Amino acid sequence: MSMTGESWVTTTFDTLEDWAARNSFWPFPFGTACCAIEFMSTVSSHYDVSRFGAEVVRFSPRQSDVLLVAGTINDKMGPVLKKIYDQMAEPKWVISMGACACSGGFYRAYHVMQGIDEIIPVDVYVPGCPPTPEGLIYGILQLKEKVARDREHQRRMNRESKDQEKTQSVNTGAPTV
């Protein structure tokens, strides 16, 4: 068996790690209303969100990296949502799906949270009442782009800090590590 030619793939570990991070989301669906039904249709065979690497739906916050909030969040549910978010391991992202999760929807009442960004940070907003499966897929694609940008920014910051340390050690005569 020959291991030459087209069977070899060369890349850097960073590139492989970036590809894996962008294409292997494990969503935790936090569905409280009709938007959760739209999420169910998005993971069905007709829309097949597995094409984008988000088919491994987890119902444990410790096993997921994307919190998908779909539906109305009232004030009593807020602490539960915050606790689930806090239990998720880093890196973690949040998709707010539907008008109720994004802005409170048509519920202008004292007991309904006017957007989940009051208690947790949101990375992608998917508007609509209810949002379409195509809208959620677009939101997942936007999250993939955000993850790629964030990882590139982090790598650039790490390189700059290492360059600064080298420059400072050269100026002070201290050995580099």
Image (spheres, rainbow, N blue to C red):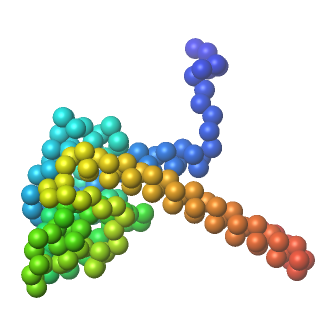
> Is residue 102 visible from the viewing direction of this image?
yes
Residue 99 lies, in percent from the top left, at 19, 64
Horizontal and vertical percent for residue 13?
Answer: 59, 46
Question: In the rendered image, is residue 87 in sight?
Answer: no
Instruction: State which quadrant residue 42 falls in.
Output: top left
In-front residue for pair 103/67 = 103
Tell me the quadrant of the picture where the N terminus can be found.
top right
Residue at far bottom of view: 110
How many marks the image carries: the answer is 0
Residue located 46% across and 56% down the image? 147
Task: Determine the residue located farthest toward the top in the rendered image.
Answer: 1
Residue 60's spot in the image, x, y percent? 24, 60
Q: Is residue 106 above or below residue 44?
A: below
Apparent side of residue 150 relative to residue 165 in the rendered image (left or right): left
Residue 132 left/right relative to 93: left
Q: Residue at x 24, y 37 (%)?
A: 48
Q: Residue at x 25, y 45 (%)?
A: 134
- Percent across and percent down for residue 28 are 25, 58
Q: Nearer the viewer, residue 145 or 161?
A: 145
In the rendered view, would you say 81 is above or below 139? below
In the rendered image, the quadrant that contains the C terminus is bottom right
91 left or right of 176? Answer: left
The residue that appears at 17% across and 73% down in the rendered structure is 104
- Residue 84 picture quarter: bottom left
